[in-house]
Image: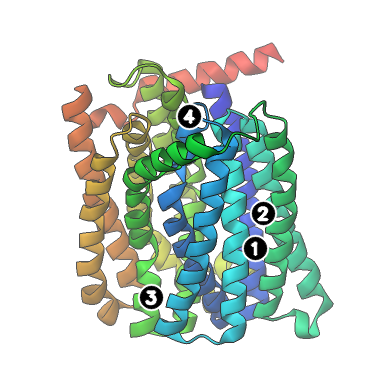
Amino acid sequence: MLRRIVHNFATRLGTAFLSFGVVWLTARYLGAAGRGAISLFVTDCAALLLFIGLLGGSSLIYLAPRRNLWHLLLPAYGWAVVVCIVGTATVAGLRHPGPAYLWHLAGLSTLQAFFSINTSLVLGRRREGTYNLLTLIQVGLLAGSLLVAFQTGGPGRSVQAYYWSSYVAFGVPLLLSFIPLLRQPDRRRRWGRRLRATTRELARHSRGAHLSNILAFANYRLSYYFVAHYVDLPSVGILSVGVALVEAIWLIPRSAALVQYVDLVHSSASSGPLPTGALRVARLAVLATAAAVGLLIALPVAVLTTVFGAEFGAARPVMVLLAPGAVIMAVQMVVSSYFAGRARYRVNNLASVVGLGVTLLACPLLIPSYGIRGAALAATLSYGASTAFLLLHFWRDTGAVPTAFLPGAADVRYCWQLLRAQIEAK
């Protein structure tokens, strides 16, 4: 399990570096206002993708080992098209961003949805290497396309460059993702009753599994809209850079949580505590997250202004206020993957409701007075409340006290012994 997590982490580390390149390019060449505009567009796309998950999402991973892939893919695609059309119309009615923005929102959200559906099915069949490669290709194409566009100068240095680069970045890996799916032994005929039954089962699982993701997204990104309303668009850009740098560290606990989730999905047991080894991996993920966050917030302001531009020095206080929440979220990701793998979606949903309640209370109170610092503090408070709720239920369910996730000297020794063994093996 640890070896698979390391492989997954290595891929996500590469993805994080490329994603950092995207953030750097857009911030450096477009400034805080351009970065803010892209952040709102990405947030709109992500919101549509969340509602697409009501007939797909992580449930595709859960059902892929048990059902015909093509019976899962067809209803997921159909629902994705409906959501993208309705969602784009909703954004048009609420914000009036202009026809060009809406066309790109509809097109890119659909491409992203299809790509997400395909890669979820690939991962559900335990093709983790292929999944990681496709993800890496997608981010690499986005960073590379943006670099070419911005280097050309002139009209290429605009928000439009991000839109067209995204078409390349999602279109090419979407086509490639069909290769591993077509190699699966599933029959592509006999639709009828089996297709209808699988669609109903997918809908039933998705509603419970994905509601927490929608609520969690609101916790992560609702502050962007509050900042845009109470402050201004450049402040959204500065906030997004601080958030992106801190959330990049989450690739560590996400790697552990993803592997744990896949293992639980394929496990025959429907209940029971996490194995001792899995708890150790969780503690190591928390330890690594805390160390990475500490290094990040130790960066002086001069580094941020040199890398991103003079406007982005204000991102450092955001990162400091987000730091405790980032470590807390490492615990939450591991615990929530346990309940998701056991199909205990209600617990995750209630935890997300708790976090969202804190966000809705804290953002209007803190952002008008403290700006983006208030947004960061509201996020940390939200993460703390939802994680405390999850830990309480995990304790009741498994008997493992919350301190079971706190790393200790034994975990450090284990890491050192493992590292020495790897070095001696080579």
| Kind of residue sitting beneath label 2 | Val
Instruction: Identify the mark nearer the N-term, 3 or 2.
Output: 2
Instruction: Identify the mark nearer the N-term, 2 or 1.
Output: 1
- The mark found on residue 262 in the picture is 4
User: How far is disc 1 from disc 4 in space, using C-alphas?
Assistant: 29 Å
Q: Residue 231, how many percent across, how many down?
A: 37, 84
Please give the residue where the numbered disc 3 appears in the rendered image.
Answer: 225
Mark 2 closeness class: few <14, some 14–19, many ≥20 residues within 10 Å: many
| Kind of residue sitting beneath label 3 | Tyr
Q: Say if residue 332 shows up in the picture.
A: yes
Q: Nearer the viewer, residue 318 or 301?
A: 318
> Are the residues at dot 1 and dot 4 in contact (C-beta closer than 8 Å)?
no
> Are the residues at dot 2 and dot 1 in contact (C-beta closer than 8 Å)?
yes
Please give the residue where the numbered disc 1 appears in the rendered image.
Answer: 22
Residue at the spot 77% in from the left edge and 85% down from the top edge: 155
Judge depth for marks 2 and 1 and give the one in front: 2
> Are the residues at dot 3 and dot 2 in contact (C-beta closer than 8 Å)?
no
- Is 167 drawn above or below residue 153 in the view shown? above
